[in-house]
Image (spheres, helix red, strand yellow):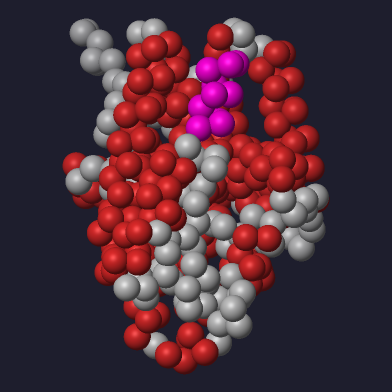
Amino acid sequence: MPGKPAQTPPVRHRVLGTVLGGRDNNLNLIRIVAAGAVLVSHSFAITSGDDMREPFRAQTGLSLGQFGVVVFFAISGLLIARSFDRRDNLAHFIASRFLRLWPGLLVMVCLAAFVMGPVLTDLPVATYWHSPGTWTFVPRNLTLYFRQHDLPGVFRHAPYGPEVNSSLWSLFYEVACYATVVLLGLLGLMRRGWRFALFMVLVVAAQLWATTHTPADGLLYRLRVLGFFGFPFALGMAAYVWRDSLLINGWIALAVWLIPLALYRTAFEPTGLMIGLTYTAYYLAFVPKGAVLAYNRVGDYSYGSEGLSRRCISSSTKRLPLWASKNPSGSSRSLRTRGLSQS
């Protein structure tokens, strides 16, 4: 008797490497949701001048906006590691990263300085155009490092203070993470083995240091932010390096949240939350199918959306004198000095 045709066994255990290759995923949807989380989180500080009113921060140690930033960095670490691995050459990789970031940034800061600024400033328009800060805003913010936070006469009486686009802070650290990928790749460390495992140990140590130390400013502050948000980026790199061994499973996506639960109300709760958010983002990006995939055809509009929305919310405060009266000249101070509250 002829045998029955062979049947393909159901896939019970998918690994990241089998689902990472194509474009049939929910990454664009996750990015726009993360951008929305940043927007909602910023609205607390923008309208009240106190970022500590954000309920997620009080309960978890991370704000909803920082949840969104963690997801952005986790996805970026995965995709940038893949991009470097698939590169034609180093110049092509660097050019791709430049074109992904700086043209959009240039448009954003030009719109802020030369379109929205003249409309929102409380100075005479002629004074605004003659102010040096109007013309240094674009070049300084394009450097990522020497950022200029304010524009002449813009948001001077907003509860949050004169910060024009509080979302730009993360770009410097994003580029620093890109440079780390290049360095590790050129040294041959972007492969499975004890060398990359040692790098991850150092990353974890840096993250734990960043979680327990709060330098106010300067180089140590920047290193702290890099250690903090570089952790989910490095998790993404590790996910790519071990992509053929990393199971993507709904039960694991639930179980991984036992880590932050075990660390609840400790100094290391944010570390556990980052691990949970990272794995859950990968699960939601590559497993759910069907109608949810339709959003992927829309494209990625997360880059810059939260910055534009921040300016729209801030501009609306000009219509609410009560908020202005609650701004004692410096209510935004906490937002740039309380650790990692920019996000």
Image quarter where the N terminus lies is top left
Q: Please say whether residue 199 is visible from this viewpoint.
A: yes
Residue in front for this viewpoint, 195 or 316: 316
Magenta: main secondary structure equals helix
Part of the protein shown in magenta: 175-184
Residue appearing at x 29%, y 69% in the figure: 125
Magenta-drawn stretch contains 37: no
**On the image, which quarter does residue 278 sit in?**
top right
Residue in front for this viewpoint, 10 or 37: 37
**On the image, which quarter does residue 296 sit in?**
top left
Residue appearing at x 54%, y 24% in the figure: 179
User: Could you tell me how many numbered marks the image carries?
Assistant: 0
Residue 271, above or below 337: above
- Across and down, in percent, residue 51 comes to 59, 70
- Across and down, in percent, residue 172 comes to 53, 39
- Across and down, in percent, residue 213 comes to 80, 50
Residue appearing at x 54%, y 57% in the figure: 343
**On the image, which quarter does residue 87 sit in?**
top left
- Across and down, in percent, residue 302 comes to 34, 49
